[in-house]
Amino acid sequence: MPELIVRNLGLVEYQPTLEAMRTLTAERDADTPDEIWLLQHPAVFTQGQAGKAEHLLAPGDIPVIQVERGGQVTYHGPGQLVGYLMLDLRRLGLGVRELVSAMERSLVDLLASYGVEAAPKPDAPGVYVDGAKIASLGLRVRRGCSFHGLALNVDMDMQPFQRINPCGYSGLQMVQLSELVSQPVSIEDVAQRLEQALRQQLGYRVA
């Protein structure tokens, strides 16, 4: 089985984390272990490479950072679990669409472990609960290796999503895990479950 390093980084600023992802991807070779980083960011909007300015409705005091991932604008903030996947897709024998599907299945499995029924949409990457979006996906692949990843709304301030058209969809409803379960949820527990789900779906040894 391929080697996987999982790093739980806590709350970290967006820009230095982005630069670290870019550096790892640029400098890795055929022997570099794959890495998944699980973390949270302070409040920030990120605009994908094809992002359109009209989807930023009223960013206000929240910074907007242009990035090279696919997709439109999204919001990151404390209480949202972000997973960055730095994987050698050639070594794993995966195409981009297969990786996206594996990420979506991992999120569906994770949410099912909390008793929440979720599903992807074929025409809009991400994971949804009754039509409301609970997780967003955005990837970039360079030299056969992925970076960027996914964001799952766990227990956060959802108001900033109203300042944008999330993922480029006007009026798209966003939802978070804490609204869907009766017991409190900790982001550390969610991160642990997400790690196991990703390991299973991507073929790594389950820790």
Image (spheres, grey):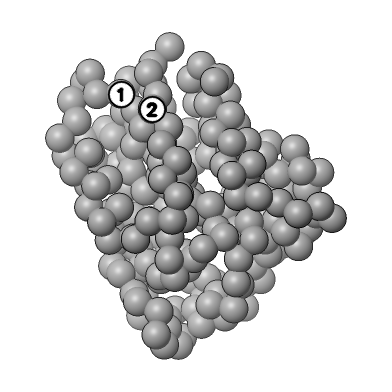
Q: Is the C-beta separation of discs 1 and 2 under 8 Å?
A: yes
Image quarter hosting the C terminus:
top right
Residue 112 appears in the picture as rendered: yes
Please identify the residue farthest to the right as the structure is shown: 182
Image quarter hosting the N terminus:
top left
Q: Quadrant of residue 47?
A: bottom left
The amino acid sitting under disc 2 is Ile
Is 19 situated left or right of 129 in this image? left
Q: Residue 43, relative to residue 24: is it above or below?
A: below
Residue found 27% across the figure and 45% down from its top: 21
The amino acid sitting under disc 1 is Pro
Residue 74 percent across, percent down from the top left: 46, 67
Residue found 28% across the figure and 67% down from its top: 66
The crowding category of the residue bearing disc 2, from other C-alpha atoms within 10 Å (few below 14, some 14 to 19, many at least 20), is few
Q: Earlier in the sequence, mark 1 or mark 2?
A: 2
Of 82 and 183, which appears nearest the observer? 183
Helix, strand or loop at mark 2: strand
Helix, strand or loop at mark 1: loop
Q: Quadrant of residue 64?
A: bottom left
Q: Residue 31, relative to residue 191: is it above or below?
A: above
Residue 90 percent across, percent down from the top left: 31, 24
Residue 99 percent across, percent down from the top left: 46, 35
Of 130 and 156, which appears nearest the observer? 156
Q: Quadrant of residue 181?
A: bottom right
Of 94 and 187, which appears nearest the observer? 187
| Residue under numbered circle 1 | 33
| Residue under numbered circle 2 | 5
Q: In the rendered picture of this protein, how many numbered marks are placed on residues?
A: 2
Q: Residue 98, relative to residue 130: is it above or below?
A: above
Is 162 situated left or right of 36 in this image? right
